[in-house]
Image: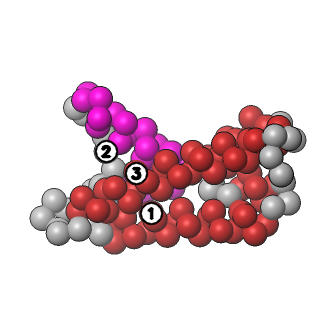
Amino acid sequence: MNPYLIFFLSWLVPGLGHLLQKKKLKALVFFCGIVSLLVMGLLMKGRFYDTSVLHPLLLLGFLGDLGNGLFYIIIRLSHLAAGDIKAITYHYGTAYLASAGLLNYLVALNAFDIAKGRKM
């Protein structure tokens, strides 16, 4: 299978690239880990970064959130990550959401490397 397609599919749904390469346990662990971070971030009333203010650090947060792939699109469209600035856990939740996306980038790159034959 094309390594670039594997990367895209793994970015779209965490662990899907590994599942397509018959790495079922890795796929399950990655999917559950990233979804857990997303759910905890939402439960902590975190919010996704946006591009309304073009500050370099906020742009990096937005790119981290974008790493959540299909979950980013679903959560953004359903307004689940609006955030509650009054919540004590607001900043932690926002960090969890961005961390899930950054971790998903690493998972997608790992699937890409496996597809290229650089890793097992």
Question: Residue 88: x and y, percent?
Answer: 17, 69
Label 2–label 1 contact, CB within 8 A: no
Mark 2 and mark 1: Cα distance apart in space: 14 Å
Q: Which residues are magenta?
A: 54-77
Label 2–label 3 contact, CB within 8 A: yes
Res 10 visible:
yes
**Three-letter amino acid code at disc 3?**
Ala
Q: Depth check: 114 or 31 in front?
A: 114
- The structure residue drawn at horizontal position 40% and vertical position 51%, both measured from the top left corner, is 98
- The structure residue drawn at horizontal position 86% and vertical position 41%, both measured from the top left corner, is 117
Residue denoted by label 2: 49
Please identify, in this view, whether the residue under mark 2 or under mark 3 is nearer the observer.
Answer: 3
Looking at the image, residue 18 sits to the left or right of residue 63; the answer is right
Against 76, residue 26 (above or below) is below
Residue denoted by label 1: 38
Which of the 4 quarters of the picture holds residue 27?
Answer: bottom right
How many residues crowd mark 3 within 10 Å: few (<14), some (14–19), many (20+)? many
Please tell me which of labels 3 and 1 falls first in the chain. 1
Res 77 visible:
no
Mark 2 and mark 3: Cα distance apart in space: 8 Å
Residue 75 part of the magenta-drawn span: yes
Looking at the image, residue 4 sits to the left or right of residue 1; the answer is left
Q: Which quarter of the rendering shows the N terminus?
A: top right
**Tag 2's secondary structure?**
loop
Residue denoted by label 3: 98
**Three-letter amino acid code at disc 1?**
Leu
Label 3–label 1 contact, CB within 8 A: no
Residue 58 part of the magenta-drawn span: yes
Please tell me which of labels 2 and 1 falls first in the chain. 1
How many residues crowd mark 2 within 10 Å: few (<14), some (14–19), many (20+)? many
- The structure residue drawn at horizontal position 37% and vertical position 64%, both measured from the top left corner, is 41
